Amino acid sequence: MIPMRYNVRSLMVRRTASVMTALVVMILFIPLGFIAGLQRTVLNAGNRGNWVVLSRGVNNEPGSYITREQYEIIRARPEIAMGPSGQALISPWRCSVRALPWAPCWEEPAIYG
């Protein structure tokens, strides 16, 4: 068995090589951990039960506009999951992105459910 004193002395003598090895390991593991965490977050957020409802003909959130009547129709649909209390699991957010200062974010909900 090699004594611990020899290992510590070897690290001190070969400082540059030890630091470079530690940097390479750090450079490899930090991005891999970041990528794995990002991938796990995206996969968990992309659940089949999560929907984003947009207006017809619109392909982004700032351009979408859902009226209160449309919200009530969507909330009553059988495809919307129900919670334990019998309420529809749908959340009307009033305004997610206010791109235009004159956009009526306070009047009608943008629907995420």
Image (cartoon, rainbow, N blue to C red):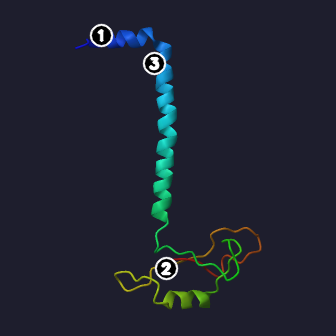
Mark 3, secondary structure of its residue: helix
Q: Amino acid at mark 3?
A: Ser
Residue to which mark 3 is pinned: 18
Q: Earlier in the sequence, mark 3 or mark 1?
A: 1
In the depicted structure, whether residue 1 falls above or below residue 51: above
Q: Label 2's element?
A: loop
Q: CA distance from mark 1 to mark 2?
A: 64 Å
- Give neighbour class at mark 2: few <14, some 14-19, many 20+ (Cα, 10 Å): some
Q: Earlier in the sequence, mark 3 or mark 2?
A: 3
Whichever of callouts 1 and 2 sits on the residue coming sooner in the sequence is 1
Label pair 3/1, CB-CB below 8 angstroms: no
Give the Cα separation between the discs numbered 3 and 2: 55 Å
The residue that disc 2 covers is 90
Query: From the viewer's perspective, is residue 45 above or below residue 90?
Result: above
On the picture, is 33 further left or further right than 66?
Answer: left
Q: Position of residue 98 (x, y in %)?
A: 70, 68
Position of residue 47 measured from the top left corner of the image (x, y, whole percent): 46, 69
